Amino acid sequence: MRIMAPGKLVLTGAYAVLEGAPAIVVAIDRYALADAPSSAGDVAVDVRALHAPTGEKLGLGSSAASLVASHAARALARGEDPRHATVRSHIFQTARAAHAREQGGGSGVDIAASVHGGALRYRLGASPNPDAEVRAIDLPGGLVLTAFWSGTSARTSDLLGRVIGLRARGGADRVFKALRGAAIDAADAVVNARMFVDAAAVFARALAALGEAADAPIFLPAFSELLALAEAENGAFLPSGAGGGDVAVWLGTAAASTAFVARAPDLSMQPLGIAVDHGGVRPESPS
């Protein structure tokens, strides 16, 4: 039997989640697939659905989903049901630790989305007890979410390293304070579509300021133009997660206009047909 683990889209809270602010993340209907092993050997994982047809990573959390699928496949081989809350808690803890070792850190928000599915509010605890608070939420009625891909891939570790370096050098406290505040406001606003979209646009501006301060390409010029166009339509447009290319999201209370949709490909942003996955990691349904 095969295990399926969904990828993710981080809507708000990127980088700020490492500052103790909440992130809003959704699991999506692109999956890593793993066969349950017959022994304790390595698990083969197929992540093609989380890559472009040309092979590039889409920035949808393929490495996290791969780890979750692998750990869940081993759990299934032990006779454990990865849909059970206790089993999922163990998968989250072990996959999060493995992912942190591979990535050199990180919040684990993508692991949480892959394990639990649906929409989540995710927040790290304060040191010395950095356990994560993972809470299922409902996205507000009327919220329109559309993902776009830039056609390029970005290395999250490189971008994260520049942001960590900025924090270590000091002198950017106002940037981090604004980012954290915007993330908190967005997470609190998720009860209402109009409020959440407005707060997401503010968070997008805070992300752009972080990228400028860290000399990191978090917010590409194409993103800046599309954010301005989105704001003119009372929407928001921002990178999903670390930024640097990869995937961005349109958030609005209506679909993006034909003018926005026509301009996006001119800036190498192609729409992705993606929906929210509500099942989390689980055995693959028979076709």
Image (cartoon, rainbow, N blue to C red):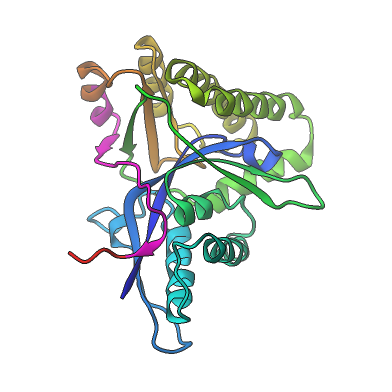
Looking at the image, is 279 positioned above or below residue 93? above
Q: Is residue 47 left or right of residue 123?
A: left
Instruction: Name the quarter where the C terminus is drawn.
Output: bottom left
The residue most toward the top is 232
- Residue 201 at x, y = what percent? 49, 20
Q: Quadrant of residue 280?
A: bottom left
Most foreground residue, 227 or 3: 3
Give me the residue at 62% from left, 64% from top: 97
Looking at the image, is 195 positioned above or below residue 143? above
Q: Is residue 162 left or right of residue 269?
A: right
The residue most toward the bottom is 39
Q: Is residue 90 left or right of residue 197?
A: right
Q: Is residue 67 left or right of residue 45?
A: right
Give me the residue at 61% from left, 30% from top: 210
Instruction: Name the quarter where the N terminus is drawn.
Output: bottom left
Give the extent of the magenta segment: 263-283
Q: How many numbered marks does the figure carry?
A: 0
- Residue 218 at x, y = what percent? 51, 36
Most foreground residue, 210 or 194: 194
Give me the residue at 43% from left, 64% from top: 66
Find out whether residue 277 is within the magenta segment. Answer: yes
Looking at the image, is 248 positioned above or below residue 229? below
- Residue 123 at x, y = what percent? 64, 42
Find out whether residue 268 is within the magenta segment. Answer: yes
Most foreground residue, 86 or 124: 86
- Residue 55 at x, y = what percent? 28, 59
The residue most toward the right is 128
